[in-house]
Image (cartoon, rainbow, N blue to C red):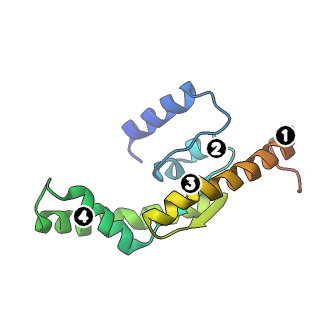
Amino acid sequence: MNALLERIHEQAMESITADVIMVQGSSFFHSHKLRNQLDYKVYLHSDSDKRLANYLTYTKGHQSFETAMQKYFEEVKPKDSSTLQSEEHADFKVQKADAEEVKGFVSEELKLLGLIIKDLCLAKKGDGSVADL
């Protein structure tokens, strides 16, 4: 992660005081220092075809199809490999493929995940480790 982005993340983490913080993107997972500030990390996986479709939808009207595809294959897709490797740092991994399923996850399964996290927080020992549940 570049130094500026890491500094921005560090400043954000220092200023946030909440029991649960949700962050979009995997850049937090790339920094050992930032990962260690989080008690639990959830990785929400999306299908590579869906990621390409979302990227093209996002860039539509902002650049030509050819430019978007070139940028995708030269810049975005190589970063996907790094992003996918960051999955190994997650405590919870959720396999979801499309936006509708993700919306369903956020509205239903996240409630369950919130209960799991709450249970884990209650079971957390004083030394920072998690008690066996």
Tag nearer the camera, 3 or 1: 3
Q: Earlier in the sequence, mark 2 or mark 4?
A: 2
Callout 1: SS: loop
The answer to whether one can see residue 86 in this image is no
Identified by mark 3, the residue type is Val
Q: Position of residue 25 (x, y in %)?
A: 45, 51
Q: In this orientation, which residue lies closer to the viewer: 90 or 34?
A: 90
Quick check: 115 above or below 105? Answer: above
Q: Position of residue 126 (x, y in %)?
A: 86, 37
Q: CA distance from mark 1 to mark 2?
A: 14 Å
Q: CA distance from mark 1 to mark 4?
A: 47 Å
Q: Residue at 70% across / 49% down in the picture? A: 114
Tag nearer the camera, 2 or 4: 4
Specify few, some or many for label 2: CA neighbours under 10 Å numbering under 14, 14-19, or 20 or more. few
Tag nearer the camera, 3 or 4: 3
Relative to 56, 11 lies left or right: right
Q: Residue at 42% across / 68% down in the picture? A: 81
Specify few, some or many for label 3: CA neighbours under 10 Å numbering under 14, 14-19, or 20 or more. few
Q: Which mark is residue 36?
A: 2
Q: Earlier in the sequence, mark 3 or mark 4?
A: 4
Relative to 50, 27 lies left or right: right
Q: Residue furthest bottom?
A: 49
Residue with the mark numbered 1:
127
Q: Earlier in the sequence, mark 1 or mark 2?
A: 2
Q: Earlier in the sequence, mark 2 or mark 3?
A: 2
Q: Residue at 57% across / 59% down in the picture? A: 105
Residue with the mark numbered 3:
106
Identified by mark 1, the residue type is Asp
Callout 2: SS: loop
Q: Earlier in the sequence, mark 3 or mark 1?
A: 3
